[in-house]
Image (tube, rainbow, N blue to C red):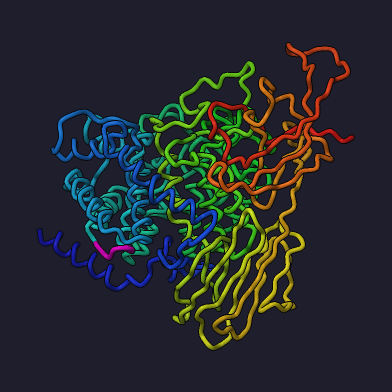
Amino acid sequence: MKKRVIGILGSLFFSVCFSQEKGIMNNANSPHVKFKSINIGDCHWTDGFWADKFKVAEKTMVPYMGEVLTGDVGHALNNFKIVAGLKEGKHQGMKWHDGDFYKWMEASMYIYAQNKDQNILKELDEYISIIGKAQAPDGYIQTQVQATDLERFGNRQYHEMYNSGHLFTAACIHNRITGKTNFLEIAIKQADFLYKTFMPTPPKELARFGFNQTQIMGLVELYRNTKDKRYLKLAELFINMRGKSKVQPDKTAGYKFIGDMVQERTPLRKAKTAEGHAVLALYFYAGAADVYAETGEQALLDALDRLWKNVVDKKMYVTGAVGQTHHGVSSHVDMVHEGFINEYMMPNLTAYNETCANICNSMFSYRMLGLHGEAKYADIMELVLFNSALSGISVEGKDYFYANPLRVSHKGYDPGNDTEFDVRQPYIPCFCCPPNLVRTIAKLSGWAYSLTNNGVAVNLYGGNQLATKMLDGSKIELIQESQYPWEGSVKLTVKKSKKTPFDILLRIPEWAKGSKVLVNGKDTNVAIQPGTYATINRNWKKGDVITLDMPMDIKLLEGNPLIEEVRNQAAVKRGPVVYCVESPDLPKNTDILNVYLPIKSNLKATYQSDFLGGITTINGDLKLRKNNKEGMYSEISQPIWETKNIQLVPYFAWANRGVAEMSVWLPVMWE
């Protein structure tokens, strides 16, 4: 009892002492971060695209998901009740289902940070109480293991580390927003249990432990909340363990998912290529980036730079999606699942692109943005957010995709597995992606700005208000007005600022060639280079107005010649948004594989406020081939063409009008 009282007092001490640091990543004191996070709630979306998405998250996404997870369909809360002795029954759901529940709780906290609805806190306190009762006296918690005869740490695929990581993160966010310690105490108790189990050196049977390693990120956040260096050392241990043991099947490591699949064939610091399960890899890299932010170990950063470049330049889709295959092999010929395969091997019809993997790509880039302060990382964040992340949820906010291919054809192809569907599903038994996406949408205003050494960086555009403190403690308030991504104009008004000069950094996206920046209607004489931040330093005063004008030209993109799957094809992109052709916009019975894109298609953009939640569509004169051949191969004959004015929709908005075929890449006609 005495130890528990001391622990509670310690938690309260940490909460009081460090409550002023409330960033999503809480890295205000991280010594090796150039772009630091703003506090949760300091930025509010007010109008436009992300304001609309946040409203859907607040009114539909989060409440609906709560009904699912606390009810008999999702069964996640029931599992905690069963272990706590509050309910009879058997565990239902995947081994990682606890983590899904923690992610939804985290999403709820981001909503509360904006609307201050006390009912959210009351509800979460009830759930936290149940989770606390389910936790074993020594701190261990994983409901499926506890509710069955499974052995603790008997197999790394039990996802004990994954669940722990999301517990740590959700509890830290809850503490930062509310100042309460009830959830944090549970996380600390579990972290202390892990520390005793694995430190200073884990038992031989646990040397390869860790599957989906979100615990690394979670432990760093716990260290940032509590300043207890044990958690940072434990996070480092989980990085150091990878690649040090012989890769062979065994009871604890498993008999199937080993080697590159779980990033254990090569130590991280020596890795040159992204391998294995894409979600596992990117969570691992994001965790290592968090560790580097605290330790500054150059070997870690060098590895992360190599891996980020390998992913983005050689294994990423035009939508920002990653994880090319459902089942395949790594470059070292290890079996992989939902993972990376060889460089430039980018199938469209069978592209897997798990929604979680895409989100993790954005999470990794957000951390790299913090470490380097370079616009290319924010460009990838944004590419994912507007395309391969949002494609994972319906416009209404209740139905989900797990996989996100770039082409769907119902002619002679059946994906035939339980995670790929013709239409989004209201519940997916493997429920990891939906709460991951919803928490990302809910917290996204926290990514919109970063604090720099002498100012503020604007990372994401959209109508919002910022009221925060810069790193020197001075207050700054900005009002951003924009209908981005449908329009390229951004107006930024200074509402409050310090009297001495400081920087405002504007991200100029790589695609935004020809952008112009004015201050109070006059040229800034600042270099405007696409793919960089334009830094404006001056003595700002209330009422100063920055205007950024980004040309929103419709562009046709082609792939690297090494990507055989897109040779002689083009993708349509306007601003950060990638477009596709969808069968509801084609003549009846038109095969999506018979749609061709003339190089001169007279493409025009039109905003439609009452269509698919309010989107900009693109129309153009496309060619439909009328005499396509059957069979594997056939003799070439002169094609017969029909020209039709066809509508293209943003990729994220496809499949909101029933069962449909779709393609991002279209064969090009040069004449």
Magenta residues (range): 176-180
Give coordinates of residue 206: x percent, y percent.
35, 40
Asked if the magenta segment contains residue 62, the reply would be no
Quadrant in the rendering for residue 23? bottom left
Identify the residue at horizontal 75%, vertical 34% (top origin): 645
Q: Quadrant of the N terminus?
A: bottom left
Q: Give the main secondary structure of the magenta stretch.
A: helix
Image side of residue 8 versus residue 576, left or right: left
Where residue 132 appears, x then y in whole percent?
Answer: 19, 49
- Residue 544: image location, x then y, percent: 60, 80
Q: Is residue 178 magenta?
A: yes
Q: Residue at x 56, y 54 (%)?
A: 365
The location of residue 626, given as percent across then percent down, is 78, 19
Residue sitting nearer the eye, 175 or 440: 440
| Relative horizontal placement of residue 528, taking residue 33 as reference (left or right) | right
* Quadrant containing the C terminus in the rendered view: top right
Above or below, 421 relative to 42: above
Q: In the depicted view, which residue is nearer to us: 30 or 569?
A: 569
